[in-house]
Every structure is written in C-alpha cells, then in structure tokens.
Image: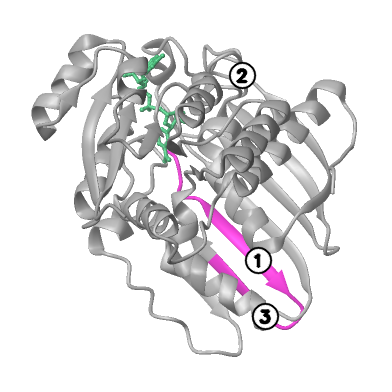
Amino acid sequence: MKQKVGFGIIGCGVISKFHIHAIEAIEEAELIGVYDPYAPARERAADEYKVQAFASQEELLGCDDIDVVCVLTPSGLHFPIAMAALEAGKHVVVEKPMALTLADADTLIEKAESLNLKVCVISQLRFSPAVQAVRKALEEGLFGRIVSASLSMKYYREEEYYTSSSWRGTWKMDGGGALMNQGIHGVDLLQYLVGPVKQLRGICKTQTRPMETEDSAAAVLEFANGAVGTLEGSTTCYPGYPRRMEICGDKGSVVLEEGHILRWDLPSVIPIAPVSEEGLKKSGASKPDDISYDGHICQLQNMVNAIFGREPLLVDAKEGRKPLEIILAIYESSQENKQVVLSK
Ligand SMILES: NC(=O)c1ccc[n+]([C@@H]2O[C@H](COP(=O)([O-])OP(=O)(O)OC[C@H]3O[C@@H](n4cnc5c(N)ncnc54)[C@H](O)[C@@H]3O)[C@@H](O)[C@H]2O)c1
C-alpha cells in the first residue's frame, strides 16, 4: 500500500486553493498535478505549488501517481468529469453539487459502486465541531421530539459576481442560483440534522440580479419525522447575514449561526467547540471565498482515512444526492406551483 494518496486537481479557480491547502495540510496526501483548460490558471497553480501542469484532462487522468481527482470546475461539468475520472480508475472528490440532475447523481452512485471506487461530495460544514455536537445531542434524544426547524441563508453577492462569470447563475452550468450554489450547504446541514424531507412547497424568484436562476427562494417543509420547517436562501440581501439554523424539540432546542452555537437549551453542558479564531470569523455571507480552510481539511482527511480503510466516508455520493433532491423539489414546486412529495 502507498504511504501517500496522490491527488490531481481539475479546475484551478476560486475553490482550488482550499483543496490544495487541505492536501498540503494532510500528512498522507500529496498534490501531483493540476489541469485547467485556461493555461494561465493551470500554470499559475503549478508554479505556486511546484507541481505538474497537465496539458489535458486525459493526460491528468492517465497519470499513475494520481489516486484521487478533485473536480472543481463549474458545476455543470462535475458529472461528466467525475464519470471520466471513475472510468480512469480514480477515486473522486467532487465539489457541490455533485451533479445537476437526480438521474446523473444516480448514474454516478452506480458507477462508483460498480467500480468499487469512492466518491466524496464536498459538504465541509458537516465537519464543524458545532454541527457534530448538535448531531450527537440529537442522537442522544436530548431534544425530545423535534417539532420545528428553520434555516435562514440571506446572503449577498455583488452584481459583478454574476456578470464577470460565464457560468454562475445559469441553468446549464450552475444548475440553479441562491439555493443550488450557496444554499446547498445549509440545506445539507438541515437534512443531515433533522432528517429527510417528506414534502415541501417552494417559491423561487429572480428579483434583482441579472441571472437566469433564482436570487431568492423560500420553502415550507414537512420532515419525515413529522417536524415542520422553513428555509430561505438569497444572494441579494444586503449586506448579507450569517447562516442561521434553529432546531426545536419539545424538550430542548439549539440555535446555530455559521459554526457558532448561539443557544444551547438542552439538558447537557454546552460543548466547547474548538473552532479556530479564523474559522469563527469566516462565513461567506457576503464574499464567496471568505470561508475557513478547516472544513475542507477535515473532509479531505476523512477521504484519505476512508481510502486507507480507517473510517467510513461521511459524505459519499448517496449523501451528496440528498440536498440535491430537496433543492430540485423546491424548483419543481415553484415552477409548477404545486406541493412536491419527495421519494423515500
Ligand atoms: N464548497 C464550497 O464552499 C465552495 C465554494 C465555492 C465554490 N464551490 C464550487 O466549486 C466549483 C468551482 O467554483 P469556483 O468558484 O472555483 O469557480 P471558478 O469559475 O472560479 O473556477 C472554475 C475553474 O474551472 C475551469 N474550467 C472550466 N471548464 C473546465 C474543464 N472542462 N476542465 C477543467 N477545468 C475547467 C475554469 O477555467 C476555472 O478556472 C463550483 O461547482 C462551486 O459550486 C464550492
């Protein structure tokens, strides 16, 4: 067995430095090389991190030293590139959303299973100590019966965020807007903590931003456990507020704001969440890259551990599908003006 897991990066944009930083921080991980069709982007990354710049995706996928491929391209390319990486025998780390349709997500899940390869879908906020503490308290039954859960993601993105990009805010390459791009993190946490959504009603609108997809969305939810809930996501709420989640039970409740526990009304001591000072300040509410490195380090470490057989993968392709299903149901509900019942 190799001592280090070799990583290759496909897509050298904004999020690539978080993956590269994480790979560098993990003792048993090594960055082998990068590819981006835009030559200055791949050469800049290769120079900065002293690794190979591959001239094509095929060349990167053909490199024997690469065990894991990180797919960090515009979202509409995640599915075809992740499939190509699996077919080349590589494990895959794919940024969110893993695909833009449930059919593609299912194909990816089946392909990974049939080849016995791992697909890790980035959902780095699950690894926050505060989220893990809430999850443990839920498992211990400290909330009693969960009756209500709400999620607020009132973010702000400058108009230029959309006008300067060929893909953001488009159906084909972003797959959605405030929910599919920014809000998917919160939607994933909501379903990770409170459980599957049974049915929902959604409204999506494009109010101020020059984009095809929604800049504002809201939904009313019923969870499989019987709880009711709401969620809101926007990228046009100036100046942008941190993500807030309230989970309420008949015996106890918590309020989370980003990685902080704001209220811990449970019959147990508040866990001291060891979030770094840097992590405490970061939220991404107003600037897309104003996020902590910590989550990507934890998630890639989990992938390396899973490859070495030391622990299960926390967010595999089946887990990555869950927030996608909820968001696509909100879009369907809004577009067809109807209640949508989710599959089991
Ligand atoms: N987990 C998070 O918190 C987080 C944060 C930001 C972005 N993201 C996700 O990361 C992905 C990339 O976002 P970004 O902000 O880095 O975008 P970006 O536009 O900054 O970078 C995308 C890069 O992909 C390259 N690219 C385009 N076509 C390609 C191809 N065929 N093969 C290889 N590379 C190609 C582009 O040249 C560009 O350098 C998106 O799916 C986004 O949702 C996740």
Does ligand 1 reach within 8 Å of label 3's beta carbon? Answer: no
Residue at 42% x, 42% y: name it.
285
Q: Which residue is mark 3?
A: 252
Q: CA distance from mark 2 to mark 3?
A: 38 Å
Q: Is residue 237 left or right of residue 142?
A: left
Which numbered marker is on residue 213?
Answer: 2
Q: Is residue 121 left or right of residue 113?
A: left
Which numbered marker is on residue 208?
Answer: none
Say which label, 2 or 3, has the lower sequence index.
2
Task: Tell me, yes or no, whether the highlighted magenta stretch contains residue 62.
Answer: no
Task: Sort mark 3 into few (<14), some (14-19) or many (20+) by Cα contacts within 10 Å.
Answer: some
Tag 1: amino acid: Ile
Say which label, 1 or 2, has the lower sequence index.
2
Task: Sort mark 1 into few (<14), some (14-19) or many (20+) by Cα contacts within 10 Å.
Answer: many
Looking at the image, the residue that sits furthest to the front is 1
Q: Is residue 116 left or right of residue 88?
A: right
Residue at 50% x, 31% y: name it.
86
Please name whichever residue, 270 or 306, is drawn nearer the observer in this view of the structure.
306
The residue range painted magenta reads 240-255
In this view of the protein, can residue 141 be seen by the observer?
Answer: yes
Query: Does 13 appear above or below 49?
Result: above
Q: CA distance from mark 1 to mark 3?
A: 9 Å
Query: Does 114 appear above or below 270?
Result: above
Say which label, 1 or 3, has the lower sequence index.
1
Q: Which residue is mark 1?
A: 247
Tag 2: amino acid: Thr
Measured as percent of width and height from the top left, residue 54 is found at 24, 18
Residue at 51% x, 74% y: name it.
133
In terms of image quarters, where does ligand 1 lie?
top left
